[in-house]
Image (cartoon, rainbow, N blue to C red):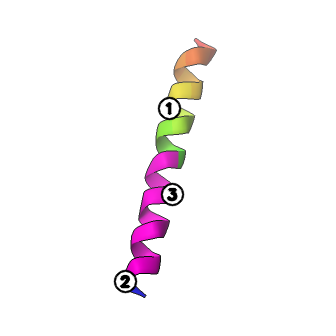
């Protein structure tokens, strides 16, 4: 459960970073 939670947290952070970069490219 702990490992699964860590992977979910990592995927969430990577998704935030990707959206942030895509947003900057939009401008």
Position in image of residue 12 (x %, y %)? 49, 56
Instruction: Tell me how far mark 1 sits from mark 3, CA to CA.
Output: 14 Å
Instruction: Tell me how far mark 2 sits from mark 3, CA to CA.
Output: 14 Å
Residue 25, above or below 23:
above
Q: Quadrant of residue 3?
A: bottom left
Q: Nearer the viewer, residue 21 or 3?
A: 3
Asked whether disc 2 touches disc 3, contact meaning CB atoms under 8 Å apart, the reply is no
Secondary structure beneath label 1 = helix
Position in image of residue 2 (x %, y %)? 37, 83
Q: Residue at x 49, y 67 (%)?
A: 8
Please give the range of residues in magenta: 2-14
Residue ID for mark 1: 20
Residue 21, above or below 7:
above
N-terminal label among 2 and 3: 2
Residue ID for mark 3: 11
Identify the image quadrant of the C terminus.
Answer: top right
Residue ID for mark 2: 2
Q: Is residue 6 inside the magenta stretch?
A: yes
Q: Quadrant of residue 1?
A: bottom left
Position in image of residue 22 (x %, y %)? 59, 26
From the viewer's perspective, tell me whether residue 3 is left or right of residue 12.
left
Position in image of residue 6 (x %, y %)? 39, 70
Q: Residue at x 57, y 25 (%)?
A: 23
Q: Is residue 3 inside the magenta stretch?
A: yes
């Amino acid at each position: 459960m702990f490992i699964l939670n860590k992977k979910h947290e990592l995927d969430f952070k990577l998704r935030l970073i990707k959206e942030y970069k895509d947003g900057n490219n939009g401008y």
